[in-house]
Amino acid sequence: MPKGYCLGRVDVADPEAYKAYVAANAEPFRKYGARFLVRDGRCENPEGSSRSRNVVIEFPSYQAALDCWSSPEYQRAAKLRHPVSTIDLVIAEEYEGPQPA
């Protein structure tokens, strides 16, 4: 079964208030098997636009990623994020096809 990924690009206007969102999202992320692959580390943006933070979260399946995002627990956490940040979020399914040789 293909894994699911949440890819987020975030600008945070109030880092102190954003900490409440980070604390609140731990429960749903744990419940749905999330694993951070990228979480606000060093990055380059050679093309296109960017935001100040980048996040890639792996889930056991595409459905688990969707279920996490739509869960009441995550939606409660997201309400803490909305007033203090701007986000572009994509939920994508893992590609399991051929790779470059």
Image (tube, grey):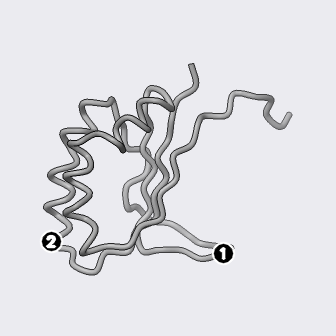
Q: Which is more N-terminal, label 1 or label 2? A: 2
The label number, if any, that marks residue 17 in the structure image: 2
Q: Residue at position x 24%, y 74% from top? A: 83
The quarter holding residue 19 reads bottom left
Q: Element type at marker 2? A: helix
x and y, in percent, of residue 38 in the image: 43, 51
Work out whether residue 60 or residue 76 is closer to the camera in this orientation and state it: 76
Q: How many marks?
A: 2
User: Which residue is under mark 1?
Assistant: 48
Q: Tell me what residue is drawn at x 29 percent, y 39 percent.
A: 71
What residue do we see at 43% from left, 44% from top?
Answer: 37
Residue 65 vs residue 53, the one in the foreground: 65
From the image, which quarter does the C terminus lie in?
top right
Q: Choose between 35 and 91: the one closer to the eye.
A: 91
Residue 78 left/right relative to 100: left
In this image, 2 relative to 81: left or right? right
Extreme residue toward the bottom, this view:
13
Residue type pointed to by label 2? Ala
Q: Is residue 59 left or right of residue 75?
A: right
Q: Position of residue 70 (x, y in %)?
A: 35, 42
Number of residues whose C-alpha sits closer than 10 Å to that of mark 1, classed few (under 14), some (14–19) or many (20 or more):
few
Residue 97: name its quadrant: top right
Instruction: State whether residue 69 is above or below residue 20.
Output: above
Which quadrant is home to the N terminus?
top right
Residue 100 found in image quarter = top right
How many other residues sit within 10 Å of disc 2, few (<14), some (14-19) or many (≥20)?
Answer: some
81 and 40: which is toward the camera: 81
Q: In the image, residue 34 lies at what x, y percent?
A: 35, 36
Label 1 near label 2: C-beta < 8 Å?
Answer: no
Relative height, residue 35 to residue 49 (above, below): above
Q: Position of residue 79 (x, y in %)?
A: 22, 61
In the rendered structure, which amino acid carries the disc numbered 1? Gly
